[in-house]
């Protein structure tokens, strides 16, 4: 498409600014819905209505466990897997303009847990504004970006324009745990020439991204009264032995993959997180079982399957050397992400247009980052084989307490998104 | 009292044997009640009726948190403290016989948790009998002994006799967690010349017993997304640092107290059990909090207060050396046992009579053991200052899976108890 004119850029920028109070208010509404894993139904209904009001003829569909089970990149089901629907709306142009490209705008609706609420300064779902900061669980990750997806389109509409190519708007659960929401949109056959996902990546573009695997280790020991502690297996101690073996593997992976393209400057990109521990039920009994929830990252090019095999082998090898575990091998349970990483190779037209849009919106050159967190964009990159642009606002304490997003940054990013959409898709009069 | 005659011994022994089917059936009923911590109300009602039927005019009374709070040896309250009542029945003789001594028969009604039920071969509350083994949670610890208390008295009654001194029969909750059930009987003023508690101590007499303290350590870290793991405090790691410090203290205590009377031959009597671990809530968040439940033992003569002070100092000293914990000190929460140990000095008349009774019932000399588990007898020993006899049947997997008690052992112990009661209290015709 031809570059936007200076007049178009000014008009689109002004349009985002003019409607920003409404965008902020809508974002606060999204935050106030909350909606922990499995509880995203109400907020998805709200999103459905927001899409419908705008004429995107949204549809809802459920997770198809059977279809997901057949895809190598689908996350593994567990009892806590969300059954909330995926919501997808589609903007259809009146006439596809020549050279215009179709686009997926994707945003996840799920949020992570709060942790102990008393460690928050305020109600985690307050949507409170203080200065430039909008607070709340999901404020940054990624209810603000989720709102930007439709408000970037609104900015065009409010000046009588709309994309002259198809735009698919996706609101997905399970981005924080399996990636199965976005995987379902892939399995349903939604396709476009590029995808943009406004995750809170500090106004940068994600150049490369780790893959992530979730798993549990379950050790069961032989419980005894603590008075005879020496004779019983302490499951916590046994489990910590397994963790030690996994830490060795983590170190080995970080060394082995230090030269992976785009990861050369990362100090320790492949983190193993021992995140949840549950063991024992009585202070005077030696704990008979210990279950830990782990998350580990892999570099692009490593398949989830090969990483999982290495983990299972490492655990089995350690167990074989352990007097108790050799007869009672720890279980490795795959219960979430089973995802390969991806890289966005430089030089795509999509990236180039986003670079211009970012410069126009912020005055700065777009920089890139290597992301060491999971991103749904891997579905589009690996399986749709399209340029996957993860680009979004500045925010902090994602997954922590007092999560916030910069309001000014959301505004700038929304301008950049609207400019990107206009040039990538082309525009037509409504 | 004069020794029992050979005829009396034979008659009492036969009486226990004749009624043993009923005793076994009653014990199975007790097991089938279950009744986890706080849920002992129904089984206490059943016990109340069993006492009432026998004319022991039972009373029920509640935990008096305020009175308990003033006693140095009371366990610390927590939200999981049982509110089930204590049940106490009293046998009054027609006439106190000269030289006869009063007696407390004490048994705890509470049981410990089951752990994962699928690790039991059968329903944990089955009361199943296989060969000599009676199975179930509490079969050994100590529903069988609890039943023996009244069936030993029944054995006398069934041959037209009853103790010629007062016998107080106590059914207490909270023996597995605070000791507050028996402490309440002390605070209510129940007194006797000796106490017998048929805990499953392998047909031995407990010569000395550790004290026990329960506490929790709570660490709160700064959570972050695992992608920036280096910058957040992992509460599990921080907590394991505290555990390391406590393990040092455990080693020091075991060394320091190696020469404590009656503990000279114990290899490692003062066990610190890291029993329950709960940390984190999301696999992709660095865990922000970790809470562990601990149990530690102390030798007789060490006060709970001085041990608690040492623990708090150790934790505080470690925290002061830790970059994060120095500003966010771990909490030490005392949430259960706060109990000193005791020793039964040899040579009491009570012990001597029990020795004879045991020999008569089993044909073997009574041996003694040093117990490294908590026992309610410390209340009677330390605060009533009476001989506290802990003596009971053979059983295994107390606090474990497939707990069982030897039926033959229960029978022998019940004979020994009946003989002991007859000689210690004296007997009179009903």
Image (spheres, coloured by chain):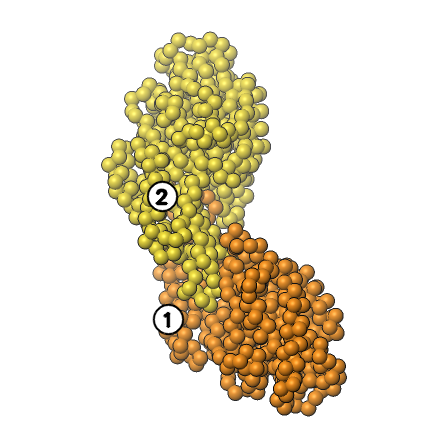
Chain colours: A yellow, B orange
From the viewer's perspective, tell me whether residue A47 is left or right of residue A389. right
Q: Quadrant of the N terminus of chain B?
A: bottom right
Given contact means CB atoms under 8 Å apart, are the residues at marks 2 and 1 in contact?
no
In depth, the one of B314 and B394 nearer the eye is: B394
Q: Is residue B333 visible?
A: no
Residue placed at 64% from the left, 59% from the top? B33
Query: Label 1 crowding class (10 Å Cα cut-off): few <14, some 14-19, many 20+?
Result: few
Place of residue B206 in the rendered image (x, y in percent of width and height, measured from the top left): 51, 77
Q: Quadrant of the C terminus of chain B?
A: bottom right
Place of residue A305 in the rendered image (x, y in percent of width and height, measured from the top left): 36, 35
User: Distance of mark 2 from mark 1, alpha carbons?
Assistant: 39 Å
From the viewer's perspective, tell me whether residue B126 is left or right of residue B243. right
Q: Secondary structure at mark 2?
A: helix
* Labels 2 and 1 in the same subunit: no
Residue placed at 42% from the left, 40% from the top? A334
Total numbered badges shown on the rendered structure: 2
Place of residue B313 in the rendered image (x, y in percent of width and height, measured from the top left): 42, 67
Residue B193, quarter of picture: bottom right
Toward the left, the furthest residue is A259
In depth, the one of B237 and B136 nearer the eye is: B136
Residue placed at 58% from the left, 32% from the top? A42
Chain hosting mark 1: B
Q: Is residue B156 visible?
A: yes
Residue placed at 35% from the left, 57% from the top? A323
The residue pinned by badge 2 equals A312
Query: Residue B252, which numbered label?
Result: 1
In depth, the one of B223 and B364 nearer the eye is: B364
From the viewer's perspective, tell me whether residue A169 is left or right of residue B78. left
In the picture shown, does residue B232 fall above or below B359?
above
């Amino acid at each position: 498409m031809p570059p936007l004119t200076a007049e178009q850029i000014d008009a689109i920028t002004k349009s985002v600014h003019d409607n920003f109070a409404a965008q902020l208010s809508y974002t606060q509404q999204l935050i106030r819905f909350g909606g922990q894993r499995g509880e995203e139904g109400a907020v998805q209904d709200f999103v459905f209505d927001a899409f419908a009001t705008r004429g995107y003829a949204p549809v809802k569909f459920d997770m198809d466990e059977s279809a997901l089970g057949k895809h190598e990149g689908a996350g593994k089901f567990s009892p806590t897997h969300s059954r909330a629907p995926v919501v997808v709306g589609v903007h259809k142009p009146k006439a596809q303009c020549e050279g215009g490209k179709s686009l997926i705008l994707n945003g996840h609706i799920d949020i992570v847990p709060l942790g102990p609420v008393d460690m928050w300064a305020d109600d985690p779902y307050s949507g409170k504004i203080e200065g430039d900061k909008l607070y709340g669980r999901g404020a940054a990750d990624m209810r603000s970006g989720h709102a930007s997806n439709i408000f970037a389109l609104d900015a065009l509409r409010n000046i009588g324009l709309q994309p002259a190519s198809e735009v698919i708007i996706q609101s997905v659960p399970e981005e924080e745990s399996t990636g199965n929401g976005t995987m379902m949109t892939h399995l349903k056959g939604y396709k476009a020439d590029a995808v943009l996902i406004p995750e809170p990546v500090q106004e940068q573009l994600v150049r490369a991204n780790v893959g992530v695997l979730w798993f549990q280790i379950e050790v069961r020991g032989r419980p005894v009264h603590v008075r005879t502690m020496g004779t019983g297996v302490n499951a916590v101690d046994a489990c910590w032995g397994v963790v030690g073996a996994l830490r060795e593997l983590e170190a080995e992976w970080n060394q082995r993959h230090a030269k992976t393209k785009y990861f050369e400057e990362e100090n320790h990109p492949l983190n193993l997180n021992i995140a949840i521990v549950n063991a024992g039920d009585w202070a005077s009994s030696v704990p008979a079982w210990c279950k830990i929830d782990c998350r580990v990252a892999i570099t692009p090019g490593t398949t989830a399957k090969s990483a999982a095999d290495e983990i299972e082998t490492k655990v089995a090898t350690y167990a074989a050397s352990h007097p108790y575990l050799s007869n009672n091998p720890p279980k490795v349970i795959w219960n979430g992400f089973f995802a390969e990483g991806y890289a966005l190779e430089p030089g795509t037209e999509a990236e180039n247009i986003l670079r211009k849009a970012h410069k126009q919106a912020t005055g700065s050159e777009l920089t890139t980052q290597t992301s060491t967190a999971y991103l749904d964009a891997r579905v589009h990159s690996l399986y749709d084989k399209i340029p996957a642009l993860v680009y979004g606002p500045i925010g902090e304490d994602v997954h922590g307490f007092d999560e916030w997003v910069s309001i000014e940054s959301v505004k700038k990013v929304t301008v950049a998104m609207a400019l990107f959409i206009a040039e990538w898709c082309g525009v037509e009069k409504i």
